[in-house]
């Protein structure tokens, strides 16, 4: 979750550490409170609970304090995506058929890594058939299976964190498969 917030450096790791510490302190508080051995168990449980709650709150808001962009504030890109194959209305044979997808990308670069550092014109390709994700590719070609019927193929150029650019960069075509 935090890895996709766009915060660079150690902040996501610190936030996750605080969240884990907070959960551990709350579990410890619960155990200490339910297993009274000494007179100081109840105050210790309250203290652990307060520390745990504080860690959870700070771990949750830390990425925002350090400049994480809200999920609605995605980077934009000037890249343009096109589908060279399959051609609109093309028919394939098989059950399932293998549809060879060939894309074109102008002004962008498909890269083989994921990162927290978002670069406007670097990313990956996601392919959807009838709204279902069928491929996450680091190239401009892919083979996707399709059952008989008419299908819609949507290709999307996404940022290196696999989130969509704003506005989304997509290309769409339809094709058919017969048995």
Image (cartoon, rainbow, N blue to C red):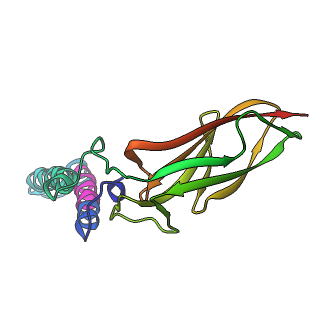
Residue 116's place in the image compared with 84, above or below, is below
Residue 61 lies, in percent from the top left, at: 17, 51
Residue nearest the viewer, comparing 114 with 127? 127
Residue 39 picture quarter: bottom left
Residue nearest the viewer, comparing 2 with 72? 72
Q: How many marks?
A: 0
Side (left or right) of 86 relative to 61 = right
Side (left or right) of 63 relative to 156 = left
- Residue extending farthest to the top is 150
Answer whether residue 73 is visible to the viewer in this image: yes
Residue 48 lies, in percent from the top left, at: 15, 56
Residue 24 lies, in percent from the top left, at: 27, 58
Dominant secondary-structure state across the stretch colored magenta: helix
Would residue 28 be counted in the magenta stretch? yes
At horizontal 15% and vertical 59% (from top left) the residue drawn is 66
Q: Which residues are magenta?
A: 18-30
Side (left or right) of 84 relative to 29 = right
Residue 140 picture quarter: bottom right
Which quarter of the figure is the C terminus placed in?
top right
At horizontal 84% and vertical 41% (from top left) the residue drawn is 96
Answer whether residue 36 is visible to the viewer in this image: no
Residue 103 lies, in percent from the top left, at: 62, 53
At horizontal 15% and vertical 54% (from top left) the residue drawn is 58
Would residue 8 be counted in the magenta stretch? no
């Amino acid at each position: 979750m935090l890895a996709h917030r766009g915060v660079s450096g150690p902040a996501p790791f610190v936030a996750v550490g605080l969240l884990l510490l907070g959960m551990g302190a709350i579990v410890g508080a619960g155990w200490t409170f339910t297993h009274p051995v000494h007179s100081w168990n109840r105050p210790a449980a309250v203290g652990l609970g307060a520390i745990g709650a504080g860690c959870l709150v700070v771990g949750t808001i830390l990425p925002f304090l350090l400049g994480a962009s809200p999920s609605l504030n995605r980077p934009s890109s000037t890249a343009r995506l096109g589908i060279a194959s399959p051609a609109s209305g093309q028919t394939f044979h098989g059950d399932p058929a293998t549809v060879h997808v060939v894309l074109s990308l102008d002004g962008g670069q498909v890269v083989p890594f994921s990162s927290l550092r978002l670069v406007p014109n670097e990313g990956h390709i996601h392919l959807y058939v009838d709204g279902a994700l069928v491929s996450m590719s680091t190239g401009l070609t892919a083979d996707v299976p399709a059952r008989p019927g008419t299908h819609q193929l949507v290709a999307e150029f996404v940022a290196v964190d696999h989130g969509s650019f704003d506005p989304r960069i997509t290309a769409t075509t339809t094709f058919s498969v017969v048995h």
